[in-house]
């Protein structure tokens, strides 16, 4: 390929990206599987009375996902174990971005993620 063709292809690719015609701008929101072991990434945060009474931990997802409990988009999920919010679950990782393995459940309070505390990896 000569240099003219390379320059033309580069200019065309830049123009498509600039105009937004290169493809979808965001990936479709995926539905979280219910009661299957999954990996999610996000930032561990401390909650207080927003999703449950008292203090607890949540995970702020890196990307929104669809809840299998309500079919609505979620960005923040309560951490718990067996339907009960866990006030200290993953507390050592507070304000850190992590990858964690666990299961999604649907207690009466809404969506909840039960992490496996010994399968947590900080993500930088």
Image (tube, rainbow, N blue to C red):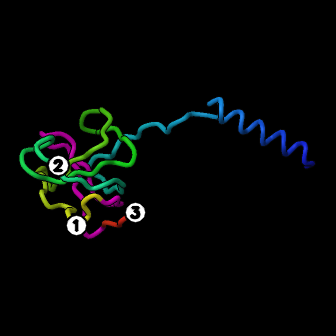
Asked if residue 99 is among those painted magenta in the image, a careful observer would answer: yes
Report the disc number at residue 47: 2
Q: What SS does tag 3 mark?
A: loop
**Residue at point 24%, 37% (across, down):** 69
Q: Which residues are magenta?
A: 96-119
Report the disc number at residue 92: 1
Nearest the viewer among 37 and 22 is 22
Q: What SS does tag 2 mark?
A: strand
The image quadrant of residue 50 is top left
Above or below for 122 versus 18 = below
Image location of residue 65, percent across then percent down:
36, 41
Outermost residue toward the right in this view: 2
Left or right of residue 55: residue 34? right
Image location of residue 62, percent across then percent down:
38, 49
Nearest the viewer among 31 and 79 is 79
The image quadrant of residue 76 is top left
Nearest the viewer among 7 and 88 is 7
Image location of residue 73, percent across then percent down:
32, 35
Left or right of residue 105: residue 10? right
**Residue at point 65%, 29% (across, down):** 19
The residue singled out by tag 3 in the image is: 123
Q: What SS does tag 1 mark?
A: helix
Q: Earlier in the sequence, mark 1 or mark 3?
A: 1
Q: Earlier in the sequence, mark 2 or mark 1?
A: 2
Asked if residue 102 is among those painted magenta in the image, a careful observer would answer: yes
Q: Alpha carbon of mark 3 to alpha carbon of mark 2: how far? A: 21 Å
């Amino acid at each position: 390929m000569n240099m003219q063709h390379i320059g033309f292809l580069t200019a065309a690719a830049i123009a498509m990206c600039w105009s937004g015609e290169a493809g979808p701008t965001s990936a479709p929101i995926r539905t979280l599987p219910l009661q299957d072991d999954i990996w999610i990434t996000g930032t561990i945060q401390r909650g207080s009375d927003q999703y449950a009474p008292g203090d607890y931990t949540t995970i702020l997802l890196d990307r929104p996902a669809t809840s299998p409990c309500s079919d609505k988009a979620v960005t923040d999920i309560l951490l718990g174990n067996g339907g009960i919010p866990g006030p200290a679950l993953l507390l050592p990782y507070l304000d850190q971005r992590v990858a964690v393995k666990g299961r999604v459940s649907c207690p009466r309070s809404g969506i909840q993620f039960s992490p496996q505390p010994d399968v947590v990896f900080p993500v930088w």
